[in-house]
Amino acid sequence: MIEGDSATCAELYALLSAITGVPARQSISITGSMDQGGNVQPIGGVNQKIEGFFSLCRLRGLDGSQGVIIPERNVRNLMLRKDVVEAVREGTFRIHAIDHVEEGIEILMGMPAGKPGPDGRYPDGTFNGLVEDRLALLREASKKEEDRKEGGKNRNSNQ
């Protein structure tokens, strides 16, 4: 279940995954609030959230692919159980701290976010490039549907 401000990063990644068709890694948990600029803001209960997901992963079997994405500004608040610290030290569980939502794209989607070029477009092979291309296709499809509906109205009014 997703609720509250501390889910805004997770909601964004889910929407971007749906838009692009690129699956997000399911072995990574996400917590973090974000502002309109994509800056990740600190959240409450960071220790409990990490420990809760860690406990679930441990029950399923730690394999080194599991971890959490948290706001960088919450790192100073970490006071984790000894078993979590040990798993991080051994590399069987990871804690990724990020300042901007684009940093989580590579972690979750396995590809670089990408930076806009001189023309303002994102390079091919980047996640943001895929988002840009997919949104252009959706805009075009929406425009064609609008034009089709408008054409139908004009035909009906001429009868």
Image (spheres, grey):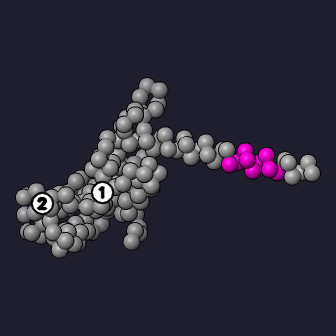
The quadrant holding residue 140 is top right
Q: Looking at the rendering, which quadrant does residue 46 occupy?
A: bottom left
Viewer-side residue, 147 vs 102: 147
Q: Residue at x 84, y 47 (%)?
A: 154
* Residue in front for this viewpoint, 6 or 58: 58
Residue at 63% from the left image edge and 48% from the top image edge: 142
The x and y percentages for residue 130 are 43, 42
- In the rendered view, would you say 143 is above or below 80? above
- Quadrant of the image occupied by residue 90: bottom left
Tag 2 secondary structure: loop
> Which amino acid type is marked by label 1?
Arg
Is residue 100 something that shows in the picture? Answer: no
Q: As displayed, is residue 132 above or below residue 19?
A: above
What is the three-letter code of the residue carrying label 2? Thr
Tell which of 149 and 74 is nearer to you: 149
| Residue that numbered label 2 is attached to | 92
Q: Secondary structure at mark 1?
A: loop
Q: Say if the magenta span includes residue 100.
A: no
**What residue do we see at 70% from left, 48% from top?**
146
10 Å crowding of disc 1: few (<14), some (14-19), many (20+): few
- Whole-angstrom CA distance, mark 2 to mark 1, is 16 Å
Q: Is residue 43 left or right of residue 75?
A: right
Location of residue 118 with respect to 133 vertically, above or below: above
* Residue ranking furthest to the top: 118
Q: Which residue is mark 1?
A: 25
